[in-house]
Image: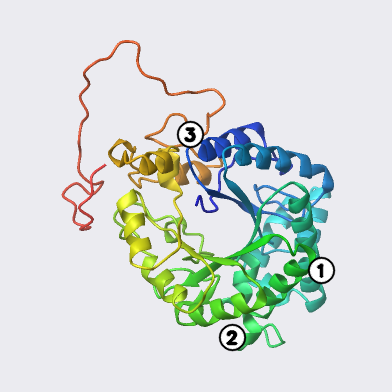
Amino acid sequence: MFPPLTTGYEDKDGNISSQSRAFYTRLAKGGTGYIVLRDVAPVRSFAPTPKLFDDSQIDSFRLLSDNVHTYGAKLGVQIFHPEYDVNVLNALFAAGEMQKVRTQLNHDMQYFVNEVSEDALMHIIDKMCACAVRAQKAGIDVIQVHGDRLVGALCSTQMNTRTDKFGGSLENRTRFALMLVQALKKVVPDMIIDYKLSVVTPECGKGGVDEIYAPEFAQWLEAAGVDMLHVGQANHTGNMADTIPPMGVQPYCFFADITGAVKQEVSIPVSTSGRIIDPEMGEGILQNGKADMIGIDRALLADPDWANKAGADKATDIVRCICCNEGCVDNVLNRSFIACVVNPENGFEETRFITPAEMKKNVVVRWRSCRYGSCPCGCKERS
């Protein structure tokens, strides 16, 4: 599985660009079986993400689904709603009130979850369902509900202070998520519903359910009609290292145990991700019964042929991700598109192609220690 990952490849209007199409098609060609597009907005939002709020956008998604299906991969869209009042911000933007846009956006990111009305929440469900219908028309295979962002903020004990039927108890805080799943099952009954179960751990995250509640909530999601779960670290803190940890911050496979605890309580397939960079790590998680599907994101940026090489017993040929976050995370934070310091093709799949050298040479590779020099962090890694 290629889990949802911000790429920056999409067109400004939210359509799937040729750059984006080439990137995901390359992953499918390399053997990735399930690809999820992150943060597909059902509304005209400010977020630099894919958007599917209008029928005119269906064709660009259909081109992508046709491409990845050619190589046998399945395609999912992760539907989310941003944590702000889209209509108000769009009106301020249209009026050229940029300072008011920034002020309102900063306010909403903290308080919208508690200020949005019940009627507005019902309209948001309607928009997300309409987005799912468009995805179905585009040939998409899976709808993944983003369990962070607005949905996760409503589930959160840290962010949700509401006193109505969407606040307080675990049942109330997860009510919107379950209502959304049930609504999706009605409008696209033949599509697979995946749910990104964002888990707030004692160390990281805000938008999602607390770790102690994750297994119980997973049972409720299965009962509501969810077909599979992707268990991951909750974010919503603005700290990208929570969900995409650089070297030395989190151990390899750092979310496998939490995923395993969830998997024990449900009968539907469960996937995990989090610093899984070679086949032995993924195989160990499967053999130990902690997950049914392995999510690999940065490692596929480093080597899009990861899956094919693993399947052909050529794991030693895999170009390993070094978890430096320099080409991927840093680029996105600097408002560029993701690339990779160990894969010059990444982001340029339309124009760059790695081929054998016409004249082979001997080269020297300088092997240096972890970014901390003597490695006081204890990560014992090399880059």
- Graded by Cα atoms within 10 Å as few (under 14), some (14 to 19) or many (20 or more), the crowding at tag 3 reads many
Q: CA distance from mark 3 to mark 2?
A: 42 Å
Mark 1 vs 3: CB contact within 8 A: no
Q: Which residue is mark 3?
A: 346
Amino acid type, residue under disc 1 in the picture: His
- Graded by Cα atoms within 10 Å as few (under 14), some (14 to 19) or many (20 or more), the crowding at tag 2 reads some
* Res 273 quadrant in image: bottom left
Identify the residue at horizontal 78%, vertical 78% (top origin).
Answer: 118
Amino acid type, residue under disc 3 in the picture: Asn
Instruction: Give the structural element (helix, strand or loop) at label 2.
Output: helix
Q: Residue furthest top?
A: 359
Q: Is residue 311 visible?
A: yes
Point out which mark residue 123 bears.
1
Task: Answer above or below: position of 270 versus 117.
Answer: above
Q: Is residue 283 left or right of residue 136?
A: left
- Graded by Cα atoms within 10 Å as few (under 14), some (14 to 19) or many (20 or more), the crowding at tag 1 reads few
Q: Is residue 18 left or right of residue 134?
A: left
Q: Which residue is mark 2?
A: 170
Question: Could you tell me residue 134's position as x and y percent?
Answer: 78, 52
Looking at marks 1 and 3 on the same chain, the residue that comes earlier in the sequence is marked by 1
Amino acid type, residue under disc 2 in the picture: Leu
| In the foreground, 343 or 331 | 343
Identify the residue at horizontal 39%, vertical 56% (top origin).
Answer: 245
Instruction: Give the structural element (helix, strand or loop) at label 3.
Output: loop
Instruction: Tell me the quarter of the image containing the C terminus.
Output: top left
Question: Could you tell me residue 262's position as x and y percent?
Answer: 46, 75
Question: Could you tell me residue 254's position as x and y percent?
Answer: 35, 63
